[in-house]
Image (cartoon, rainbow, N blue to C red):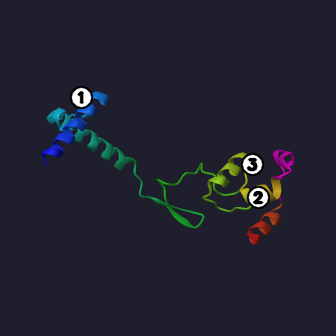
Amino acid sequence: MSEDYNKIAKLEQEIKKKYGADAIKNPLSSWDQSKEKEYIDQIKEVSSREKSQGSTEKEYYNGFLMDKKLFNRDNKTDCPVCGQYSFSVRNDVYLNKWDCCRGCFIRWVEGREERWKTGWRPEGEASDDQREGE
């Protein structure tokens, strides 16, 4: 047992040499009642701030009931061409750059980027055909 204590003491000495005395100091040695009170006050403040900002209201979006707190209207997850909803990060890249999902990019934009940039979009029937094929 004393062998274990000697090993621990040697480890502490090496840690103290390499990282300084604060590395082996007991965290409670510098903790007092004023720090405890300050910590509790900070916890109460954060808790009350979260309660006042928190929303339990729900809103329907594309047939799903979502918490308003999680709902982000700026998030482009619906493809404006085919209307498909996606959680894919890959689709987010295409939506941000080309204003369509990856499938629509491959079908309508790839090889015709200049026409797409000028504002051309497929007719309503064309986007319906894509939805049926997937």
Q: Which residue is mark 1?
A: 21
Disc 1 to disc 3, C-alpha distance: 57 Å
| Dot 2 alpha-carbon crowd within 10 angstroms: few under 14, some 14 to 19, many 20 or more | many
Is disc 3 placed on a helix, strand or loop?
helix
Q: Nearer the viewer, residue 80 or 2?
A: 2
User: Residue drawn 83% across and 49% down?
Assistant: 116
Of residues 2 and 77, the one nearer the viewer is 2
Percent across and percent down for residue 41 are 24, 39
Residue that badge 3 annotates: 98
Query: 107 above or below 40?
Result: below
Q: Earlier in the sequence, mark 1 or mark 3?
A: 1
Q: Is residue 39 left or right of residue 53?
A: left
Specify which label sits upstream in the sequence, 2 or 3. Answer: 3
Residue 8 vs residue 66: left or right? left
Q: Which residue is mark 2?
A: 104
Label 1: few (<14), some (14–19) or many (≥20) C-alpha neighbours in 10 Å = few
Contact between marks 1 and 3 (CB within 8 A): the answer is no
